[in-house]
Image (cartoon, rainbow, N blue to C red):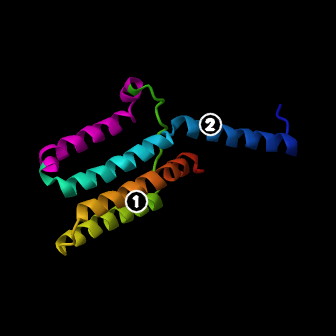
Amino acid sequence: MSTTPTPEEARRALQDVDRRRGQTAAAASRSRWIWLGAGVFVAAYGVLADRYPDFVRTYGTTIVILLLLLSMAGNTRWGATLLRRPVRPRIVPSPASLLWSALVLALLIGGTALATALDVPHVWLWSGVLIGVLLAAAGPWWQHRVLTRTA
């Protein structure tokens, strides 16, 4: 036998679902300090690449590969256990979000390549600072939006 909930019970149930969705997103999200640290790291990498190109030629690929492995490890059960983080929910990206991500990535890469081709001074410095600031400022907003979006 099923009963029809009252409007007040339905409202409370929907509020509970929204509250739990927020709790899940908060548990799965990375700290704002991680985003700020990542932005500072990318900006520092750009400054290093501009000021000390030999350092980046020698160690740059190794640094990038280690950071990519760390990032990938944080999104697997085994890696999350080692890092003592909850496993993030698997989110299937929508075609529109993939398109926007590809567009932003193409603009960043294209702008940097164009500036390099035109011999603009300090391309590494400015692109590193721009991408670092974008990562630190928009990273938490983007992560919250992705984790709390509705189906």
Task: Work out how far the residue at label 1 is from the one at label 2, CA to CA, in angstroms.
Answer: 26 Å
State the SS at label 2: helix
Q: Quick one: which residue is furthest to the bottom in this view?
A: 118
Front residue of 68 and 122 = 122
Residue 129 position within the rendered picture, expressed as x and y whole percent measured from the top left: 34, 58
The location of residue 70, given as percent across then percent down, is: 32, 36
Residue toward you, 140 or 9: 140
Q: Which mark is residue 23?
A: 2
In the image as oriented, which residue stretches furthest toward the front? Answer: 51
Looking at the picture, does residue 33 appear above or below residue 86?
below
State which quadrant residue 113 falls in. bottom left
Label 1 sits on what residue type? Ser
State which quadrant residue 78 falls in. top left
Question: Which structural element holds mark 1?
Answer: helix
Which sits earlier in the primary sequence, circle 1 or circle 2?
Answer: 2
Q: Which residues are magenta?
A: 55-82
The tag on residue 101 is 1
Neighbour class for label 2 at 10 Å: few (<14), some, many (≥20)?
Answer: few
Horizontally, residue 66 falls left or right of residue 103, namely: left
- Confirm whether the magenta stretch covers residue 77: yes
49 over 1 or under it: above or below: below
